[in-house]
Image: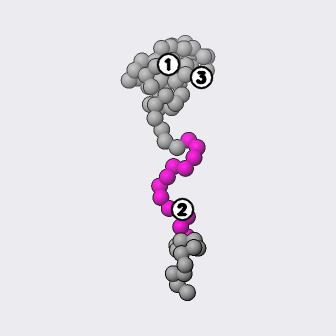
Amino acid sequence: MPGGDMTGPPRGGGAGRGRGLGRGMGGGGRMRGNQPGSGPAGECVCPSCNARMTHQAGIPCYTISCPKCGVKMVKG
């Protein structure tokens, strides 16, 4: 009988709807380590020789070459 008493699962499956991020690492934002947009504070670190320099706001670390060995820096 169609319709029934409305105690069963919704028609059409009902699962998998919506746009929720679920659990885990959903969403981005600032202050997340060496990811883009991780904030102006901190240091740029060379992944090769471990040289460090103060991070300058507005200049991504990956655009700066290490002054000692020339490898691109990362946010540290």
Residue 22 in the image, given as x and y percentages of width and height: 55, 50
Q: Is residue 70 visible?
A: no
> In the rendered view, would you say 70 is above or below 5?
above
> In the rendered view, would you say 3 is above or below 12?
below
For image coordinates 38% across by 23% down, the residue present is 58
Residue 73 in the image, given as x and y percentages of width and height: 52, 22
Residue 30 in the image, given as x and y percentages of width and height: 46, 31
Secondary structure type for disc 2: loop
Residue wearing tag 2: 16
Residue wearing tag 1: 42
Q: Is residue 20 visible?
A: yes
The N terminus - image quarter: bottom right
Which residue sits furthest bottom?
1
Mark 2 or mark 1: name the one nearer the start of the chain: 2
Identity, as a three-letter code, of the amino acid under mark 3 = Pro
Disc 3 to disc 1, C-alpha distance: 15 Å
